[in-house]
Image: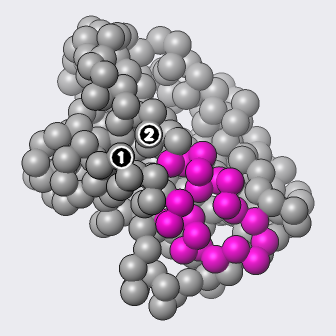
């Protein structure tokens, strides 16, 4: 069932989103070659807890760390640890914060030092896909319009759109209805939810430089591209309003 949020609930989610955005701002400023993904995780946990929130991902279905750090061919759900970042890497940083029981969830992909032009274009296009999706969100719009916006732009530039993972509703639970795919097909049209004021959703394009197919590593969490080419990921928590949309996961 879809949960519709009151203005008070949206305000709490806005605060959770601000905390997530603070982690991303720190990462964009500080991630550099020689840093480990574990160091990024430690910094994120410190920021979240100092703001009076808890780390949404920690312990979620057994996930062992605070945030997800996905490097190069890792699409999502990378586990922070001893991996050391090198010049030219790209790293997806997916962050969740829970504030007074309400959650914010967002992701960015950050270049590590100087990156190749093709990796820069992948990251930029993924961010643009998220922006394109946000522009279509509003009351009366179907969820398929979000997927169409992402898929049209991504495929026009030759990127694979991951289909095994999607955006989602969010509130006091990390994953709520509706599911928000980044593509459109017969299945998505058959379950095409109409957006209404009070809904809060996460939109999260995942684009691959090569094929769209992915697989999960033996750790049971880390999703990688099947051809091991780079992937990028962006996400925002977004409230549907009476006249459009409000991005909650911003400073």
Could you say whether the residue bearing mark 2 is in a helix, strand or loop? helix
Vertical relation: 106 (above or below) 89: below
Question: Of label 2 and label 1, which has the lower sequence position?
Answer: 2
Residue 34 visible (yes or no)? yes
Tally of marks: 2
Q: Is residue 141 left or right of residue 55?
A: right
Image point (17%, 40%), residue name: 229
Task: Determine whether 102 is above or below 15 in the image.
Answer: below
Q: Are marks 2 and 1 in contact (CB under 8 Å)?
A: yes
Give the numbered dot on residue 157.
Answer: 1
In magenta, the rendered stretch is: 129-149
> Which of the 4 image quadrants contains residue 33?
top left
What residue is pinned by disc 2?
A: 125
Which-is-in-front pick, marks 2 and 1? 1
Position above or below: 109 against 237? above
Q: Quadrant of residue 94?
A: top left
Q: Position of residue 15 (x, y in %)?
A: 76, 41
């Amino acid at each position: 069932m879809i949960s519709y949020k009151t203005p008070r609930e949206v305000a709490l989610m806005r605060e959770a989103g601000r905390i997530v955005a603070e982690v991303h701002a720190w990462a964009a400023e500080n991630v550099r070659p020689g840093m480990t993904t574990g160091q990024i995780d430690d910094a994120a946990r410190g920021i979240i807890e100092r703001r009076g929130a808890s780390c949404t991902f920690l312990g979620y279905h057994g996930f062992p760390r605070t945030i997800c750090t996905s490097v190069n061919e890792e699409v999502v759900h990378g586990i922070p640890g001893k991996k050391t970042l090198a010049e030219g890497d790209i790293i997806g940083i997916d962050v969740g914060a829970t504030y007074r029981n309400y959650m914010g969830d967002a992701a960015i992909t950050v270049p590590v030092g100087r990156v190749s032009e093709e990796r820069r274009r992948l990251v930029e296009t993924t961010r643009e896909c998220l922006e394109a999706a946000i522009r279509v969100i509003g009351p009366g719009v179907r969820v398929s319009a979000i997927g169409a916006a992402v898929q049209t732009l991504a495929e026009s530039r030759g990127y694979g759109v991951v289909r095994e993972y999607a955006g989602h509703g969010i509130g006091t639970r990390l994953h709520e209805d509706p599911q928000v795919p980044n593509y459109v097909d017969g299945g998505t049209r058959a379950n095409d939810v109409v957006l209404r004021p009070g809904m809060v959703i996460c939109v999260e394009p995942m684009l691959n430089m090569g094929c769209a197919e992915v697989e999960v590593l033996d750790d049971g969490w880390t999703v990688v591209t099947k051809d091991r080419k780079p992937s990028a990921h962006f996400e925002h928590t977004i409230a549907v309003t009476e006249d459009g949309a409000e991005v909650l996961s911003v400073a």
